[in-house]
Amino acid sequence: MDTRFLGIPELTEVPSVAVVVDVMRAYTVAAWAFAQGAEKIVLAGSLDEALALKAAHPTWVALKDGPPAPGFDTVNSPGLLRSTDLGGRTVVQKTTAGTVGALAVKDASLVLCASFVVAEATAEVLRTRGGDSITFVVTGEDGRADEDLACAQYIARRAADPRTEATEYLTRAADSRAAHELTEGIREGVHPDDVSLCLELDRFPFAMLATSEESLMTLRRYEGSTP
């Protein structure tokens, strides 16, 4: 299996299979949204697009990075989202890196969005559908975010060898710049449990599959072996 680990600026061609990784916090939040009952997540390309979608669909739940803002229902925090009932709702998500990475590979034949909380389920899809070439999009810090790279490398190695242990990868993520900034309150819109929630390995039994639906990049939970 040929694997590449690229930052968003390094995506010069459309990959066949893409795994978009954002540990802290977009795709940990997305997994929690599904666990709280969300039917689907629409990945917005801009704050204005997110607000327009919310205005057109008032029952949708809009969230963003950073502090609360008018027009948005909540922020990109797993600690805050875990107490929200999203049964049957559509979520509109716009983040600094995670949603940008997914939209950058929207034309790939298979797009998975991942973090540690869905690592094994993602690896299982790659074992069955990954093919010969997989591109991991390391979304944070233009591809240098160690929490995202560690998670991407863990999923890649786990897909190739299910005996791969997670400890060293989780340790790298815990020591990352993003983890420090969340813990120290440097970033806004943060719950004290966010870092620990982002480091919960395989909290959820599903992968997250992104496809184009009515011109919108839409994320859905996926349980099974054939997307």
Image (tube, rainbow, N blue to C red):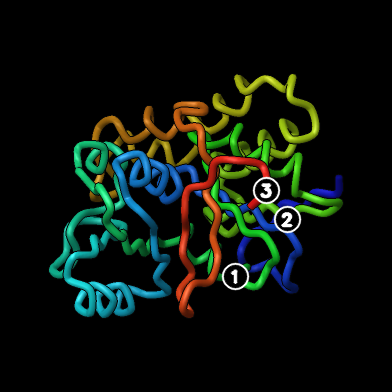
Q: Position of residue 2 (x, y in %)?
A: 85, 49
- Number of the front mark, 1 or 2: 1
Label 3: element kind: loop
Q: Please, what is the three-letter code of the amino acid marked with disc 1?
A: Lys
Counting from the top left corner in percent of width and height, residue 48 is at: 29, 79
Amino acid type at mark 2:
Thr
Q: Does the CB distance between marks 2 and 3 fall below 8 Å?
A: no
Q: Residues within 10 Å of mark 3 (few under 14, many from 20)?
A: few
Left/right placement of residue 49 relative to residue 107 reads: left
Q: In the displayed structure, does residue 38 sit left or right of residue 213? A: left
Q: Which mark is residue 135?
A: 2
Determine the secondary structure under disc 1. loop
Structural distance between the alpha carbons of marks 3 and 1: 19 Å
Question: With 170 as the anchor, is 196 left or right in this view?
Answer: left
Q: Which mark is residue 173?
A: none
Circle on res. 106? 1
Q: Residue at x 63, y 43 (%)?
A: 149
On the image, which quarter does residue 161 sit in? top right
**Residue 155, how many percent across, how many down?**
66, 37
Q: Which secondary structure lies at badge 2?
A: strand
